[in-house]
Image (spheres, rainbow, N blue to C red):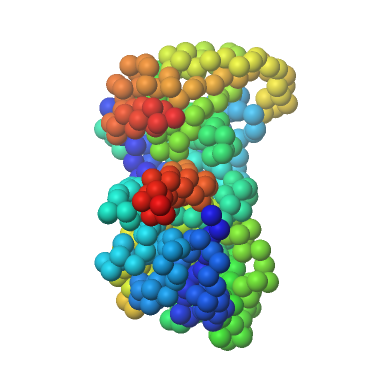
């Protein structure tokens, strides 16, 4: 089976371009797509019907049944069920994180890493930098500004005197994350990257949906939630970060908890799940 | 955890304001002789406390009835890959010695290490002539790894015993259940059963 994978992100022109290419390409047996539900619902009908369609959906399986396999990565327990021939899977075993984040996550650490994703349309980077200004003299603060964030110059000029402000791509992000004592993030998949790197996070949420996932991870014993971006304050962020910085025991407890939350072998496990399911339905699907 | 409870004690994370008590305990001559390094000054202790202190956890042992700190427990060299750590236990308040607090604190501390930090083994290095501590380690089921002569805090050659406590021991011995107030033994048993 040949598998093509695409990340469909309406804010990411590179990914959107890749998606366009994918939709025109008919040589693959399986398509693995992830992105916002509306985007998936738009793209899935365009794929060749003889191909397997695997969709990663944040909010559960699509009601229209456009995909053969619907996967919802979440911090909850892993569950798999069949709906007719469709495989519906959800849970923590489907959280895929780069292997490089797991390796060497036990090294020396210090300081705070701020990372708010590629475009950061809500300017969470500036809010986090404002929040961390009081501790930048005592603890090194590194700010990684997303490649698509147009505010790099502004952030660098406002905060660069006390913080290390870098463009995404200028540094080995995984190593930076593994060397930080605490990360300030805006939820999303970065929360699971923090888990893999065993770097406790203080997360801001863009919306209630993101908040729910972050709360689930926090309830599992990892990280802190500083609330919705629209209602949190620099003070709330600062207090949460300081609490983690002055409590090595708490950080260590979270690091220990992380070993149960994200699996380094999740991709292999999913591949086996996919093959098992496909083997069971193949005789009916392709007589 | 904010508080680890036992029948007569509770353990809580070490705070900056504990500094004077800890330095006083460490400076008591009989206690100082048990350590590998000389007693710290208050400034040295605070500098250490304010440092990142990666790979270690430090709690204070408090007598529940009086709410007074009586000692410390620690894990250093915590290795989450190998699931191991080196433990330290000190009942520094001389009036609190001889009451079984050391055993009670150590049991709760090991349970925390196994159940919350996910350790598979906890090592300890004890002076060969520190009989009270050796009795505690024996009661908990420690296995001797080796005996060695190492320089003490004054640089004098001193006999030490290096021991290890495997996690499974906490599910086998009643002493762990008798101190456990948090369901640590059940959590540990479940983890070990999962492999």
Write the residue at 49% across / 55% down: A96
Residue closer to the observer: A203 or A93:
A93
Image quadrant where residue A151 sits: bottom right
Name the residue at the front extreme: A287
Q: In the image, is residue B140 above or below residue A248?
A: above
Write the residue at 55% across / 73% down: A25
Residue closer to the observer: B149 or B45:
B149
Residue closer to the observer: A121 or B157:
A121
* Residue A197 appears in the picture as rendered: yes
Q: In the image, is residue A60 above or below residue A17?
A: above
Write the residue at 53% across / 34% down: B83
Image quadrant where residue A70 sits: bottom left
Q: Position of residue B5 (x, y in %)?
A: 31, 34
Q: Position of residue B67 (x, y in %)?
A: 31, 38
* Residue B63 appears in the picture as rendered: no
Residue closer to the observer: A137 or B109:
B109
Label tally: 0
Q: Position of residue B4 (x, y in %)?
A: 34, 37
Q: In the image, is residue B180 above or below residue A245?
A: above
Q: Is residue A125 left or right of residue B181?
A: right
Q: Is residue A89 left or right of residue A269?
A: left
Q: Position of residue B27 (x, y in %)?
A: 56, 33
Write the residue at 52% across / 47% down: A268
């Amino acid at each position: 089976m040949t598998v093509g994978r695409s990340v469909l992100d309406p804010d990411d022109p590179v990914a959107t371009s890749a998606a366009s290419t994918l939709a025109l390409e008919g040589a693959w047996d399986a398509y693995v797509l992830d992105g916002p539900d509306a985007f998936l619902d738009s793209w899935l009908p365009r794929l060749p019907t003889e191909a397997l369609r695997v969709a990663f959906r944040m909010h559960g399986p699509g009601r229209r049944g456009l995909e053969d396999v619907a996967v919802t990565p979440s911090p909850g327990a892993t569950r798999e069920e069949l709906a007719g021939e469709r495989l519906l899977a959800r849970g923590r075993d489907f959280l895929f994180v780069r292997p490089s984040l797991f390796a060497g996550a036990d090294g020396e650490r210090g300081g705070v890493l701020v990372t708010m994703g590629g475009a950061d349309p809500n300017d969470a980077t500036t809010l986090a930098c404002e929040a961390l200004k009081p501790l930048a003299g005592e603890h090194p603060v590194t700010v990684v500004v997303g490649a698509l964030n147009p505010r790099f110059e502004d952030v660098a000029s406002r905060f660069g005197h006390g913080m290390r402000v870098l463009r995404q791509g200028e540094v080995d992000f995984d190593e930076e994350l593994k060397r930080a004592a605490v990360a300030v993030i805006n939820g999303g998949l970065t929360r699971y990257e923090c888990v893999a790197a065993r770097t406790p996070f203080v997360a801001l949420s863009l919306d209630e949906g993101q908040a729910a996932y972050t709360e689930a991870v926090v309830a599992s014993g990892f990280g802190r939630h500083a609330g919705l971006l629209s209602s949190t304050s620099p003070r709330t962020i600062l207090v949460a970060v300081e609490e983690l910085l002055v409590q090595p025991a708490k950080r260590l407890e979270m690091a220990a908890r992380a070993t149960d939350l994200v699996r380094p072998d999740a991709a292999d496990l999913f591949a086996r799940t996919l093959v098992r399911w496909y083997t069971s339905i193949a005789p009916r699907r392709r007589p | 955890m904010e508080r680890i409870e036992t029948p007569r004690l509770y353990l809580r994370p070490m705070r900056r304001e504990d500094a004077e008590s800890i330095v006083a305990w460490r400076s008591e001559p009989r206690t100082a002789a048990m350590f590998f390094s000389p007693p710290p000054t208050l400034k040295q202790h605070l500098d250490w406390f304010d440092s990142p202190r990666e790979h270690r956890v430090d709690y204070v042992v408090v007598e529940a009835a009086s709410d007074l700190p009586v000692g410390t427990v620690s894990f250093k060299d915590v290795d989450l890959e190998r699931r191991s750590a080196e433990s330290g236990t000190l009942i520094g308040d001389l009036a609190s010695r001889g009451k079984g607090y050391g055993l009670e604190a150590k049991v709760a501390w090991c349970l925390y290490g196994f159940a919350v930090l996910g350790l598979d083994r906890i090592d300890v290095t004890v002076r060969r002539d520190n009989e009270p501590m050796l009795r505690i380690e024996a009661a908990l089921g420690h296995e001797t790894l080796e005996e060695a002569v190492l320089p003490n805090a004054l640089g004098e050659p001193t006999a030490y015993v290096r021991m290890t406590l495997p996690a499974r021991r906490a599910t086998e011995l009643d002493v762990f259940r008798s101190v456990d107030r948090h369901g640590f033994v059940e959590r540990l048993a479940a983890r070990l059963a999962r492999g």
